[in-house]
Image (cartoon, rainbow, N blue to C red):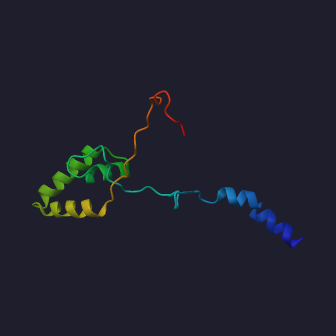
Amino acid sequence: MYGLDLRVQIGAVTEVAEAAPRQHGGMTDAPYRRLLRPQDDRIVAGVCSAIGRYFGVDPVLIRVAFAIFAAVTWGTALLAYPVMWFLIPEEPLVAPATTTPPPPGWPVS
């Protein structure tokens, strides 16, 4: 009887296996947001754009706030930008999807 109760509490093996995180190329699906510098929305290195995307704010507001913060601190805040440039990883490049069909006689895989 105890084994039956435990199975009811935990769930069937297939339910537990479906709830496990999936792996893609050796990496698991991250349950959290990642702070990555984008490839497409940059002015200098994409640091302000990365912070804006992470917090869901327009990157222009982050840039303006950073410029005001740099002016208020007499430029001391500008030392943080290269540090963040170094610490925030770049977003991986994604190959564009081809929509044109292969030429006749070309092997299709």
Outermost residue, right side: 1
For residue 23, what is the image quadrant? bottom right
Q: Image height check: is 57 above or below 104?
A: below
Q: Quadrant of the C terminus?
A: top right
- Locate residue 10, reporting x and y percent: 75, 64
- Locate residue 34, reporting x and y percent: 41, 56
Rendered residue at 68%/56% (across/down): 18
- Locate residue 101, reporting x and y percent: 47, 29
Outermost residue, front side: 105
Judge from the rendering whether residue 98 lies leftward or rightward of residue 49; answer left or right: right
Rendered residue at 23%/52% (across/down): 45
Judge from the rendering whether residue 92 lies leftward or rightward of residue 74; answer left or right: right
For residue 90, what is the image quadrant? bottom left
Q: Quadrant of the N terminus?
A: bottom right
Outermost residue, left side: 74
Residue nearest the viewer, comparing 13 with 71: 13
Rendered residue at 40%/39% (across/down): 96
